[in-house]
């Protein structure tokens, strides 16, 4: 099977967060051993209304991804809270392990 150097999950967190273990497992399977996984997500300002019990905002997303340390390590995480848009953007970059 073809293996990828980079996998990007762009603005999809809210759609897949209920089965994040399967998403992480699938991404891990299709990546090269030192591949990079990039998660980009917009977070509405103020209180998050959807999925708070799984990943409450950017910090909650970091916590969720840290629970998969057997598959990925976080190598960079950035959150832009100075945007003039109605949301703040977060980007998390992980490296495949194992």
Image (cartoon, helix red, strand yellow):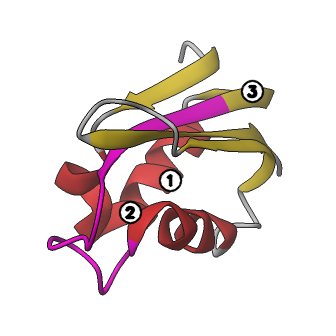
Q: Is residue 79 left or right of residue 52?
A: right
Give the alpha-carbon distance from disc 1 to disc 3, as whole Å.
Answer: 13 Å
**Could you say which is closer to the camera, residue 6 or residue 92?**
92
Q: CA distance from mark 2 to mark 1?
A: 6 Å
Circles 1 and 3, Cβ within 8 Å, touching? The answer is no
Give me the residue at 15% from left, 73% from top.
49
- The residue positioned farthest toward the bottom in the image shown: 53
Where 2 falls versus 92 (above or below)? above
Residue at disc 3, secondary structure: strand
Side of 2 relative to 97 (left or right): left
Q: Residue 38 in the image: state x and y as whole percent.
A: 58, 32
Q: Nearer the viewer, residue 38 or 77?
A: 77
Q: Main secondary structure of the magenta part?
A: loop
Q: Would residue 48 appear left or right of 81 to someone viewing this image?
A: left
Upstream in the sequence, badge 2 or badge 3?
Answer: 2
Which label was assigned to residue 24?
A: 1
Residue depicted at x 52% and y 38%: 82
Q: Earlier in the sequence, mark 1 or mark 3?
A: 1
Q: Residue at x 67, y 41 (%)?
A: 78
Decide: is 54 above or below 13: below
Which residue is under mark 3?
Answer: 35
Task: Tell me the distance, in whole angstroms, between the alpha carbons under discs 2 and 3.
Answer: 18 Å
Quarter of the figure with residue 31: top right
Q: Which residues are magenta?
A: 37-56
Is 89 or 62 nearer to us in this picture? 89
- Label disc, if present, on residue 20 of the rendered structure: 2
Q: Is residue 69 above or below residue 73?
A: below
Q: Contact (CB < 8 A) between labels 2 and 1?
A: yes
């Amino acid at each position: 099977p073809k293996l990828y150097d980079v996998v990007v999950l762009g603005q999809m967190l809210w759609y897949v967060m209920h089965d994040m273990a399967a998403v992480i497992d699938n991404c891990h399977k299709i990546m090269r051993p030192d591949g990079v996984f990039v998660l980009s997500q917009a977070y509405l300002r103020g209180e998050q209304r959807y999925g708070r019990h799984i990943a409450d905002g950017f910090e909650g997303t970091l916590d969720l991804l840290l629970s998969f340390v057997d598959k990925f390590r976080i190598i960079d995480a950035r959150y832009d809270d100075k945007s003039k848009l109605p949301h703040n953007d977060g980007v998390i970059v992980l490296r495949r392990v194992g």
